[in-house]
Amino acid sequence: MAEGKETKVFDGREHVLERGITGDFAFVAAWKADRLGNLVYRKTARNFNPMAATAGRITIAEVEELVEPGGLDPDEVDTPGIFVKRVVVAPRVKRIERRTVRKG
């Protein structure tokens, strides 16, 4: 499998060097964004969305809330706007299921 590919030895083990996968599009869902494309995620969305946003040539972010530039605390920004090409505002309806049991 390593034939014709660059290899390096790290800690005594030989590894094959490959280029990373880059997709044409990356779709991510964020909680809040500014008009410059800086994104803030909530809860488990922080696990993979920041890396997915950097992996696409064109990143499209669906956000719940859009604020003006300067409306986000710089320490809260999870994905810088340089990676985001489009921002779509799509407020989510938060549905809460309730289980009802018939009395009888």
Image (cartoon, rainbow, N blue to C red):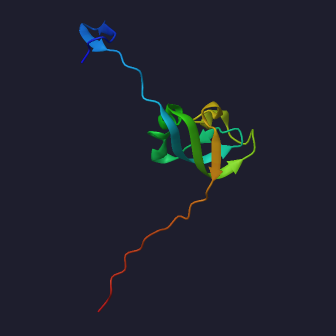
The residue located at (72%, 47%) in the rendering is 67
Give above or below for 75 relative to 7: below
Horizontally, residue 4 falls left or right of residue 74, namely left
Q: Position of residue 99 (x, y in %)?
A: 37, 75
The residue located at (60%, 32%) in the rendering is 83
Q: Position of residue 45 (x, y in %)?
A: 48, 45
- 28 vs 31, nearest the viewer: 28
The residue located at (27%, 8%) in the rendering is 11
- 11 vs 14, nearest the viewer: 14
Q: Position of residue 54 (x, y in %)?
A: 53, 32
Q: Position of residue 22 (x, y in %)?
A: 47, 30
Question: Which quadrant holds the C terminus?
Answer: bottom left
Give above or below for 65 relative to 70: below
Which of the 4 image quarters holds residue 20?
top left
Give above or below for 44 relative to 76: below
Question: Which quadrant holds the N terminus?
Answer: top left
- 5 vs 95, nearest the viewer: 5
Horizontally, residue 89 falls left or right of residue 42, namely right
